[in-house]
Image: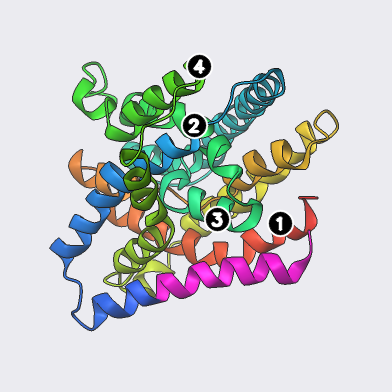
Amino acid sequence: MDFLPVATSIFTLFILIGVGFLAFRMGYITRSGASGLSSLLVNVAIPCLILESMQVPLSSGLVYSMEVIALIEVVVYLVSFISAIVIPWCLTGSVFETGVLRFMLIFSNLGFMGYPVAYAMFGEESVFYVTLINLPFGFLVFTLGVFLLRPDLARNPDLKRILTPGLIASVLGLCLLGTGTTIPSPLNESVSLLGSITTPLAMIVIGTFLAPLPFFSMVSDIRVWIISAARLILIPVIVFLITSPFVTDPLLLGIPVLLAAMPVAANTVLLSEEYGVNAELASKGVFISTLLSLVTIPLIGIYLLP
């Protein structure tokens, strides 16, 4: 993959992050406003993007592609789980801090950054595969993720938190895919327009999220740098080395590897706050990994992806 197109795509997205950052710092977007934009993105824009992307004819070639993606994702999660067991064990911290570190290694920013970055690098066709990869994400976050953060609360998972609009849209999208049904006009046009705001809105929301974080306190924890390096480089490189000998299609190989290289999931902070664990540590992980991804994502695209 050539450097210039990759770098241009990524820097374009980070300019939008800068817009969100400045808008928050200048008072154009408040904390409550940023929360509202995030809710709109997660509960409306991304579900609409999912529904639109799943309206494709089901063919034998597409079924094969789905099977390949599923197998690669098994590898991604196995590598992530093993990393989450080994790496935090070597670092100091309380039980709850270790849980936050493990959460950061397993769950990447598939929703906010996955869709726009994959779209920028691979085009519209990538949205369908990103949706497939996102299918188990919500379920795992609110089951395994809660267990990592608070083992004492994980015995009674909240089904309301699992049945998110994104998960519901994914299931509906699979029904549309399996039956060959398309959303009728003009509803389809509305869904398409709402889905199209995902990329700029996601980047602006990330910028507003990073804006209030104190910079110097964010960069002083060595554990966060180690976790970020593993999240952004180690995991995708291992996944690539395992899967590349068996997968020749650049799209089927590139998208899972790219998503494995995403920074720490933004909801790490939200869940850490909600479950009363170290939200500051989670904020550091999101901050550092997101900033470093400005460099690491283009490098992954250039050196690993065809």
Q: Amino acid at mark 1?
A: Gly
Q: Amino acid at mark 2?
A: Gln
Secondary structure under tag 2 reads loop
Q: Is residue 159 visible?
A: yes
Q: How many marks?
A: 4
Q: Residues within 10 Å of mark 4 (few under 14, many from 20)?
A: some
* Residue 160 position in % (x across, y down): 19, 25
Which quadrant is home to the N terminus? bottom right
Which colour scheme appears in the figure? Answer: rainbow
Sequence-first disc among 4 and 3: 3
Instruction: Report the residue marked by disc 2.
Output: 55
The residue at the point 41 percent across, 70 percent down is 17
271 shown above or below 262: above
Instruction: Report the residue marked by disc 3.
Output: 117
Say left or right for 274 vs 262. Answer: left
Instruction: Report the residue marked by disc 4.
Output: 178
The residue stretch that appears in magenta = 1-18
